[in-house]
Amino acid sequence: MIRTIFDKKLIKFILVGLINTLLGSVIMFLLYNFTILNYWVSSALNYIFTSILSFFLNKYFTFAVKEWSVFMIAAFILTIAFSYFIAYGLSKPVMNYLLKDFPVNIRENSALFAGMCIFTILNYFGQRFIVFKEKKEILND
């Protein structure tokens, strides 16, 4: 199991994640800090835009999946949504509690960063083992 998690696909996923994180961070933090958009809208727009990029990069580059299916697209959307709501739903109250003496913008920027980290972990497992799961060949004897 450990070898299944820590392999070349993880390295590729991290590279794709770095690209998405850079682009998404710019989108999210600019929207939050320089527009009237709040925590939820800024983080959601980040994930809407970068998830589209992520789907194609992970499908073709990271996991080298050629086929298309309704299940794959639905599973990808559900994985992103699940990872997003868990990550950002947990990080905001935790950072509000841990940083209760700090201004709201510090707490919410910290929550956005923590949410990115939690999201990445949850998203990797969902994409690796559900969305782009390798099909094992069944050998006929």
Image (spheres, helix red, strand yellow):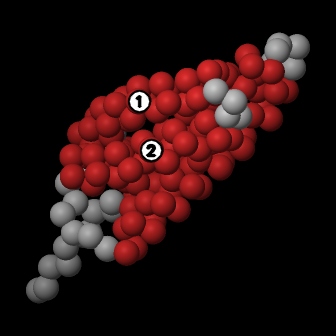
Answer whether residue 129 is visible to the viewer in this image.
yes
Q: Position of residue 67 (x, y in %)?
A: 21, 69
Q: In the rendered view, does 93 fall on the left or right side of 2?
A: right
The vertical placement of 13 against 67, above or below, is above
Q: CA distance from mark 1 to mark 2?
A: 9 Å
Q: Residue furthest right?
A: 101
Q: Residue furthest top?
A: 102
Q: Position of residue 122 (x, y in %)?
A: 52, 46
Residue named by callout 2: 49
Helix, strand or loop under label 1 = helix
The amino acid sitting under disc 1 is Leu
The quarter of the picture where the C terminus appears is bottom left
Q: For the residue carrying disc 2, how many other residues have a C-alpha within 10 Å: few (<14), some (14-19), or many (20+)?
A: some
Answer whether residue 4 is visible to the viewer in this image.
no
Q: For the residue carrying disc 1, how many other residues have a C-alpha within 10 Å: few (<14), some (14-19), or many (20+)?
A: some
Q: Of the residues under marks 1 and 2, which one precedes in the sequence?
A: 1
Q: Position of residue 19 (x, y in %)?
A: 34, 31
Residue named by callout 1: 23
Residue at 19%, 73% (x, y): give it. 137
Query: Would you say the residues marked 1 and 2 are in contact, meaning their CB atoms lie under 8 Å apart?
Result: yes
Helix, strand or loop under label 2 = helix
Residue at 34%, 45% (x, y): give it. 53
Residue 21 sits in quarter? top left
Q: Position of residue 83 (x, y in %)?
A: 57, 49
